[in-house]
Image (cartoon, grey):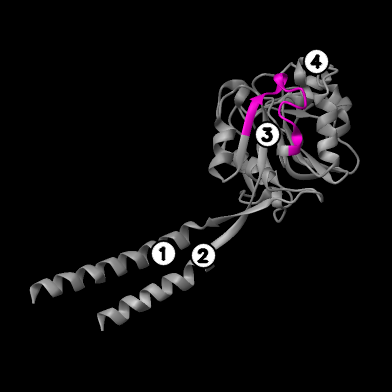
Amino acid sequence: MKYGIQRTLLLILVLIAPLTISYAQAADILILDDDYGTEVEDDLTSAGHTVTSLSYYDWEGDNPNLSAFDVVILLNGYEYGYELGDDENSPAYAALEEFIRSGGTFASTEWVIYDMDDDIKLGLDPILPADYTSYVDYNYSGTYTVLQGDHPLAAGLPTTWDAAEDADGGSCTDLKPGAITVISRSMDDDPTGDCLTAYALAYLNIGQGVSIHLNSDLGHEDDVDATPQLLQILRNVATFRGEGASPVAVPMMSAAMLALLAALLLILALRTRRGQLSTLDR
């Protein structure tokens, strides 16, 4: 009888294991880093992506070449005030534009718009959803609000959450025509009243690809780690595609299904052990 139970449990394991596996998009990601640390890289790697990281002011557009990547993320919260490739005429800007138009996903964070208002990184203007010429000011704190709860870029996020107190900065600026806002943010630390609301996450379809701007410095400017919500946004960015991309599927198992499999294996092990002890007692 016990052998029948064991065979039944084994059959359940064989049948249920494939059903517990879902497929997430794995991406080859290039982080043009702000030198804050490996926080974003580590989080994206733990989500199953392959990540390459280097300082953005060292990247000239071909070191490495973008043909090897699905996603490029430009972090700008810690080391700002520099050009890509450390030169306003760097071929990095043209390489990024071609990457997006050919189907790549590009994402930027603050202080990109702040830099552009200071005539730095103007080579990004053709590929950003924000209109840097409308820049008003910058601000901190406030509340994030998801405007499109069913959007892939909002997956896994609460409806609202508070920004890190005095350590989550963003710029106040308008968006270009055609840009789509997924998340907004209020910014409560402006006595002038000129910078109380702004978009938090917006994107613009360009060619076959997409350019996304996350209006946050992730706290890096103030030596603070990004909140879990901001890291979740970057995870969503990693799997958001324009029409030209063909991401690879990798198996991912949910925590609930892992727990179920573990329970079944434990039951099988206990029954096997009891059978062994029963045999010894005879």
Residue 87 shows which numbered tag? 4
Circles 4 and 2 in contact, beta carbons < 8 Å: no
SS type, badge 4? loop
Structural distance between the alpha carbons of marks 1 and 3: 35 Å
Please state, as top left, top right, bottom left or bottom right, where the C terminus lies in the image.
Answer: bottom left
* x, y percent for residue 233: 65, 42
Structural distance between the alpha carbons of marks 4 and 2: 50 Å
Q: What amino acid is found at the position of numbered circle 4 in the picture?
A: Asp
Residue 162 appears in the picture as rendered = no
Q: Is residue 119 left or right of residue 77?
A: right
Q: Observer-nearest residue: 26 or 155? A: 26
Q: Residues within 10 Å of mark 1 (few under 14, many from 20)?
A: some
Return the residue found at the far right.
177
* x, y percent for residue 237: 69, 43
Return the residue at label 2: 20
Residue 261 shows which numbered tag? 1
The mark that comes first in sequence, 3 or 2, is 2
SS type, badge 3? strand
* x, y percent for residue 200: 73, 38
Residue 127 appears in the picture as rendered = yes
